[in-house]
Amino acid sequence: MNRRLFIKGMAACAAGFGFLKSVVALAVEWPKAVFDSETETDAVKAFFGDTPIAESADVEIKAPLQAENGAVVPIKVSTTLADAESIAITVEKNPVPFVTVVNLQPGSSGGFYSARIKMGETSLVRAYVKAGDKIHMASQEVKVTVGGCGG
């Protein structure tokens, strides 16, 4: 028996008996306005609304001071805030400034997020952490020698 046909048949049986949930049912609504924003300010406002933003020592960014290739820039964001809900990363001069966001487990003490992002040119990278009714922010400039966003 062909392995591919067997797996397709088992998946069809599992779906028929209700063991598999629809992907549409599990999907979260896409924040179109956030990723369609042309400026970082508009993107942050579209995602967080009018929540006050303040620089905070409780948010830490670890990123290279100089990235040799803007197509792959490793970024690590950590926070010690006990009521952290989400971590978002923006790149000021990217064509799409809002790069990524992750929602944290409710009730977690602190948070950590690591990603590899694209950067078109030397720019400020900002990390926003939503905790309670405030947005905490940290920033770091990353110099890019070869652009990753089509450059």
Image (spheres, helix red, strand yellow):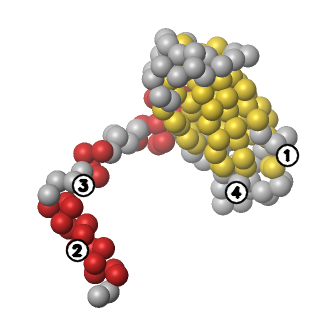
x and y percentages locating residue 9 in the rendered image: 22, 74
Residue designated by label 2: 9
Q: Separation of disc 1 and disc 3 at Cα?
A: 45 Å
- The earlier-in-sequence mark between 3 and 2 is 2
Q: Which amino acid does label 3 sit on?
A: Leu
| Mark 4 or 3, closer to the camera | 3
Q: Would you place residue 111 above or below residue 54 in this image?
A: below
Q: Would you place residue 15 above or below residue 83 in this image?
A: below
Across the whole image, how many numbered discs are drawn on residues?
4
Q: What residue type is labelled 4?
A: Ala
Q: Are dots 4 and 2 in contact, CB under 8 Å?
A: no
Q: Which residue reaches farthest left?
A: 16
Q: Separation of disc 4 and disc 3 at Cα?
A: 36 Å
Residue designated by label 3: 20
Q: What residue type is labelled 2?
A: Gly
Q: Are dots 4 and 3 in contact, CB under 8 Å?
A: no
Horizontal side of residue 22 vs 30, given as left or right: left
Q: Separation of disc 3 and disc 2 at Cα?
A: 13 Å
x and y percentages locating residue 66 in the rendered image: 85, 46
Residue 66, label in figure: 1
* Quadrant assignment for the C terminus: bottom right
Name the element at disc 2: helix
x and y percentages locating residue 95 in the rendered image: 60, 47
Q: Would you place residue 118 above or below residue 41 in this image?
A: below
Residue 71, label in figure: 4
The answer to which image quadrant residue 127 occupies is top right
Name the element at disc 4: loop
